[in-house]
Amino acid sequence: MVIEASGIMPDVEVGPDNTYLIDNKTFVSKDEVYGGYKCADRGMLLPIISEYTWSIEVRGFLYLVGLLYCFLGVAIIADIFMGAIEKITSKTRKVYLTSEKEEEPEVIEVRIWSDAVANLTLMALGSSAPEILLAIIEVIANRFEAGALGPGTIVGSAAFNLFVISAVCVVSIPNGESRRIKDIKVFAVTAVFSIVAYLWLVIILKAITPDEVTVWEAAVTLLMFPLLVLLAWLAEKNFCGVPNKTDTSKQIELGNFQPDTVNHNSSSCCGRVLKVCGLESDADKFIRDRQYFRDGRLDRDGLVAFIKEVKNYPGLTDEDAAVLAASKLVESQSHSRMWYRVGAVRNMTGGRKTQPQLSTKLKQVYNAINEHPEAPNLGEVPQVKPHQNAIIDFHAGSCAVMEDIGKFKVALCRSGRLDNRVSVRVETIDGTATEEQDYVPINEVITFDPEETEKLVEVEIINDNQWEPDEEFFLKISLLMNSEEREGVQLGRISIMEITILNDDEPGVVMFQKRGFLVKESIGNAVIPVVRKNGADGEITVKWRTIDKTALNGRDFTGGEGVLTFKHTEIEQSIEIPIIDDMTPEKDEHFEIELLDPTGGAKIGQINRTAVTITNDDDFNNVLNNMMKMTNANIHAMQVHHETYVSQIKDALNVNGGDIENATAGDYVLHFLTFGWKIVFSLVPPPSLLGGWLCFFISLACIGVLTAIIGDLASIFGCLVNLDDAITAITFVALGTSLPDTFASRAAAMQEKYADNAVGNVTGSNSVNVFLGLGLPWLIASIYHAAKGSKFIVQAGSLGFSVGLFSGLSIVTIALLMARRIFGVFGKAELGGPTGAKIFSGIFMIMLWFIYVLLSAFQVTGYFSF
């Protein structure tokens, strides 16, 4: 007898010995019921149509495609789910601090949610919801009997997270860099619990009540979850530990730097070289960065300073400046692991990006601002790919030499990839100086051997023994014409170097650059450049003083007098005059600055006096207000959650969230593949409603439904290709649910200065998977069986072996991470460090994952028993 229905008919009940009772009359065997309709009884919801006439191969292929497609669907709804979590955990409270003005206390906002609590509760649930719900749904669908797919997915996902994700993060750090876990106490707690959790499973399945889970065992498993959260919170707050010298709960971290003991004068030659060459100290970088956006917040002063820097690059509109400001703000903010996971999902689905999307031109400016804030603009900057290519550029963008120097050497630097042999061409280009008259021309090929990071090019200056004005020419790096020789190498940002030939017979003439300067009242400090021309021999000084006109010293500006010192070969210095912003409308006013009394043989040039005009800020304020609005709009476009249905649906309908200009071909393909899921899930209420909780529960319900379908797809697919559910779980399902976490952790490892968001949360997530993903469904099932007077049977078999094997290998992996933190051979950091050590660590952890999968598969298929 053949029943041509899909799945079990409503009037069919399971009888003894895997038979079916039909209409309460006849017991028939499974084969008779399905008549060769293979695997039709494996799903709770599937198949929804009869596939009786389809071939096994076609069905297997379709179920695999369906499984992969549903993984994309889960990733998209998880994106919305974690947007709700971001809304919930981003709640803040105001803290009032004393300030210089007693009547205007400084107000800051701090998060209500503890980082440890948020990571182990809502954020862990957000990343692990598919695995947890799969285990719960499987138990309920099996009439409260244990299945292999849910527990296998949880253990397999934990193995992939710990071994593979850790390996990817270790090797993804750029050469010469490293990342350490900051909250090591919290990591220690979660690491211990991640081992205890799986050892506890082995104990209850093999020792206490073999092949059975009782109510108290399931209850203890579930209660370990709040215990973990409590201990992690205590560790974060440093209870029962060595007291911190400062109360970190009452301060905001501004940066990790050590102040320099040497006070580098920013106007000195040394200071400029440090900045141009990218060798400034951490303290210098901190001081430079904080002038823009403190704590990742948009403020007027920071925006003014940033726009002034941006405007040094010609051809940029106000809209471009607003995009760059928003990008700088997003980069300067601290981000959670969830933020990186949402970004990874959107990269996989062609959705709106959480990270700045800049055009090629804006990327060039942005990189220049970040890396070399005072370097000259020497042309287009190529996109740098340090992991693929060797990067060749000059050590500095410009230099000045005396005419009688003869020969001197210029350094070419190599960064990025170091394991290949690369060559570039160096040649000279005339400026006001001409070859053969002022310098000896150069046109030669420079070759870097593997691991070689610097080459010197000899330049010869011709001394003609007659006075002439300062002249300049250029050195240029270019790639070779042969396509084979161009592989694996690219030019860096400083591919052209300006060389100024200074007259060696004169100390020079000192003068202002211009006869007048225009500044806004809110500028802060007016910076007036003073230049030294026609010679730079020896050290000279020149005095300056301000002269009141319609602007008065002490009321409109802070003037006075001072001395500028030009060291040997220095050709530019600046006078800084603080401008007083009295916030009252007034007419334009001006004052003058005069140069006088030069020493060291120098002379005063023609422009010995300049006028500084202070203009009213009304027009400036209007422009600035518009800039702040545009910047806020750009920041809003990059946030992880939506505020309205309109923006949510708009993002779903458009590739890259509507940012078509920056959309790639891959974005279009991925958007097309996931368009259906995006439209369906755009109907979920946005996180702005009810503080994010409505979106939280509805999206969780959607994940549950989709997870049930994934469970059916995986089970039927495994059956069709003759794979046990346990093997399907630790391979296909575990990989499908863990891939977004892999990309998220890699991005966090490369962009964060600590390793917490990359690997520090992996152990916590693995623990939560067990405590909620197994503790909750096992508690429900064990209570159900206890009420019926039966036992909840969980065969130790493959699950016990898989858990025991993973427990042993996880101890080895965590020990390796701790060894990397302690020993110098690994760079004393969990991630990155010396190239050889990090590659060894990555390969070792990948091998552990292969060992886990292979041995687990061999045990399931009966090669050995446990």
Image (cartoon, helix red, strand yellow):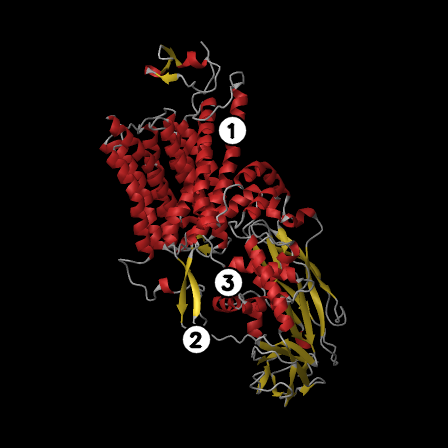
Q: Which residue is mark 3?
A: 297
- Tell me which label, 3 or 2, sits earlier in the chain: 2
The residue singled out by tag 1 in the image is 64
From the image, state whether disc 3 or disc 2 is nearer to you: 2
363 up-or-down from 607: above or below: above
Question: Can see residue 608?
Answer: yes
Residue 146 occupies quadrant: top left
Q: Amino acid at mark 1?
A: Leu
Question: In which image quadrant can residue 305 be found?
Answer: bottom right
Which mark's residue is nearer the viewer, 2 or 1? 2
What residue appears at the point 28 percent right and 59 percent down from the top-left corner? 241
Circle 2: residue type: Glu
Compared to residue 769, the image places residue 313 above or below, namely below
**Which residue carries the number 2 mark?**
103
Say which residue appears at 45% left-offset and 15% top-offset: 34
Q: Is residue 487 above or below residue 270?
A: above
Q: Residues within 10 Å of mark 1 (few under 14, many from 20)?
A: some
Q: Nearer the viewer, residue 53 or 843?
A: 53
- Please name which of the two marks, 1 or 3, marks the residue nearer to the observer: 3
